[in-house]
Amino acid sequence: MRIATWNVNSLRSRIDRVEAFLERHDVDVLALQEIKAREEQVPLMGLQARGYDVAAHGLDQWNGVALISRVGLDDVTIGFPGQPGWGEPPVVEARAIGATCGGVRIWSLYVPNGRKPDDPHYTYKLDWLAGLHAAAAPWLDVPTALVGDWNICPTDDDVFDVAQFRNSTHVTPPERAAFQAFLDSGWAEVTRDHAPGYTYWDYYRNRYQRDRGLKIDFVLGSPAFANRVTGASIDRLERDPDAGVATSPSDHAPVIVDLD
C-alpha cells in the first residue's frame, strides 16, 4: 500500500495537481492539509472517477483536512478527543480527520503554526500537541499513522539556517519536546531514513530555487505500522515552480510512504 501526505495549500486551486499526483505515483491513500474549503466545496468528480472516496473536514477558507482513499474509508472521525479550540469563544478548528483505510488507521493532521513564541497561538499549538499525544496513546496498539504538517523542525538539520529561527517558532525547545514526546511513547517517524531533505520552501525570495527549506511534514507510525514500511520519498517536483505545470505549486512537497 502506498500512502502520501501533502499540505496542498488550497485543494480547489490545485485539484489538477492532486489528480495528476495520484496517478503518477499510484497512491492508495492521500492525506491532505490546508484544503481551504468546506466539505461541499471539495471538487469530487475527478477523484471519484479515478476510484477514490473522499472524507473532508473544513469550516471556512482557512485550514481544513481531508483523506482520499481507494482502499476503503471507514469509521471517519472528525477531530480527536480533547482537541483544543482557538479563539474567543474557542472553536475546534478543522485540523484533524481520521479514517481506516485498507486496515490502517490514518490521521491527517494540520498542527497549528504558533506564529511567534510570545503569541497566544504558540500556547494553543503546545496545548494542541499535548492533546493529540494524550488522545493517540491507545492508537499505538493498532496499525496507525499520524501524518501531515507538524509545523515543527525536530532537529537543526531540518532547517536551512537555524540561526535565522532562534527567535521564531518551529525550532523552540518546547515544540521539539512536544514532538519528541511522541517518539518517546513508541511512535516512529518513518520517513527520515528513507527520504532526507526538506518538505517546505517559503515562496519568499526564491527559497525553493536556493534550497532554503524546512522539514516539517512527517509520518509517525505505531509499531504495527512502522514495521511494514519499506521506503519513503519526497516529491520535490510538486514544489518546483519551473516544472512546466500551469498551476502554481503549493509551498509544501508531498511525502510518500510504501508499506509491505
Image (cartoon, helix red, strand yellow):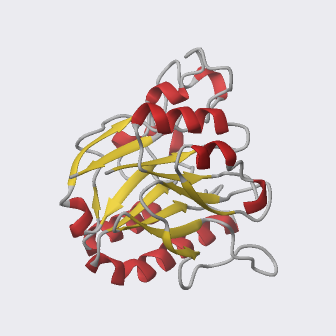
Position of residue 47 in the picture relative to residue 119 (left or right): left
Position of residue 12 in the picture relative to residue 102 (left or right): right
Q: Residue at x 26, y 80 (%)?
A: 141
Q: Nearer the viewer, residue 4 or 54?
A: 54
Residue 163 vs 227, above or below: the answer is above
Q: Residue at x 62, y 79 (%)?
A: 84
Residue 240 vs 119, above or below: the answer is above
Q: Report whether residue 64 is seen.
A: yes
Position of residue 18 in the picture relative to residue 235 (left or right): right
Position of residue 237 in the picture relative to residue 59 (left or right): left
Residue 203 vs 181, above or below: the answer is above
User: What x and y, as percent, mark residue 215?
Assistant: 43, 42
Residue 136 vs 116, above or below: the answer is below
Choose top left, top right, bottom left or bottom right for residue 114.
bottom right
User: What x and y, as percent, mark residue 190?
Assistant: 28, 53
Q: Residue at x 29, y 67 (%)?
A: 187
Q: Report whether residue 172 is seen.
A: no
